[in-house]
Image (cartoon, rainbow, N blue to C red):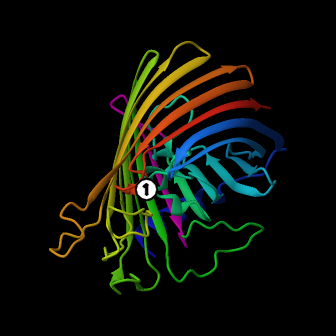
Amino acid sequence: MNKFKKIGLTALAGSLVTMGSATAGEMSVSGSIGVTLGYGTLGGNSSRAIGSDRDVAFTGSGELDNGTTFSMNTLLDDSYEVSGTTTTIATPSFGTFYVGTGYGLQSGRYDEEVPQAYEQISDAKQTMANLVGNYMDGNAISYTSPTFDVMGASITVDAGYAPTAADAGFGDGANDAHNASYGEGTELGVRIAYDALQIGVYGTERETSVPNSNTTTGQEIGDEFNGAWYVKYSMGPVSIGYSETYMDAGVTADDSSSINSSVVERTAGGIFTGEQMSIAFNVNDNMSISYTTSDETYDTQDDAATAVTTDDDVTETVDAIQVAYSMGGMSIKAYNMEVTNPDHDDDAADASITEIALGFAF
């Protein structure tokens, strides 16, 4: 067992030993419903459709005599199936522990972390930035430290460990089955806040449990590394942000890698890098608007003389304008996103995607 895991397990054991009896807990139910109108072109096809979304969340909480609090959150999707569930134990001095499945136990604090009025741009077009560290969304244990005050700055550390980092969750006490492709995953992030300035840095690694091979070349696939960092700053009603992301799935490039065909992250050989910039403006307490631009570059890492092209890089660009208006429990939101080189394909037609959403929270 490495030092990273020893530290986490020792801290958790110590915090549990000091727990006393629990007081009566509470249970609550909340949810939201939404109707969307979406239209545009993607993949050369035009579409116009109405969609609906219904989410119900069950939350329970309680407190021990020593001040430790515990809570449970389970989110049900439209078909009333569990889409994520997390148990949280917050200690007075040792920090907070999370155990469960779902999106963004830690990676969600760092991916696409720029100010936006409505949705992350991956809502319309899946981006590499949104995939950073998502293989930790399965059964995992995560930890958030207490916030430390250092020379006026607030510093918080996040860490996580998954025995099988295959992005698969199991409920009812079931354990992850052996995965022939992926082994354990670890993640570590640091968030710093100083007045209106926020900075975050995140890295995560996933091991291969057995020697994998690229299906075309037969070359070995190595461990995967993802990383992200961001900076945000608020000036009254205006917020600006910048973020960079990196993904190396450890897949060796092969002769099928090309800038003239669709590319799937983690499957294609090579390296993905990206950057997002955004500015958001709160018009008043109810209305906000934002503009975001994203560039994600795919590099096949195939620089041989026999490569398909001498320029093996292609950049997918997304420009998004968003607006949101809320009135109590009701909201009206919309975005328009223009996509160039979707799926990192130089030959793909540009896309334009628009969505208008009416939502209610209860």
In the image: residue 158, left or right of residue 199: right
In the rendered view, tell whether residue 207 sits above or below residue 237. Answer: below
In the rendered view, tell whether residue 215 sits above or below residue 320. Answer: below
Q: Position of residue 207 (x, y in %)?
A: 43, 74
Disc 1 residue type (three-letter): Asp
Q: For mark 1, does the 10 Å Cα neighbourhood hold few (<14), some (14 to 19), or many (20 or more) residues?
A: many
Question: For mark 1, what is the residue?
Answer: 343
Front-most of residues 138 and 159: 138
For the residue labelled by badge 1, is the local secondary structure a helix, a strand or a loop?
Answer: helix
Q: Is residue 209 visible?
A: yes
Q: Is residue 244 visible?
A: no
Majority secondary structure in the magenta region: strand
Q: Position of residue 75 (x, y in %)?
A: 74, 50
Q: Position of residue 192 (x, y in %)?
A: 39, 38
Q: Residue at x 35, y 83 (%)?
A: 220
Front-most of residues 74 and 343: 343
In the image: residue 352, left or right of residue 72: left
Q: Residue at x 58, y 61 (%)?
A: 141
Asked whether residue 158 is drawn in magenta, I would say: yes
Which quadrant of the rendered structure holds the C terminus?
A: top right
* Region rendered in magenta: 146-165
- Residue located farthest toward the top when viewing the structure as drawn: 284
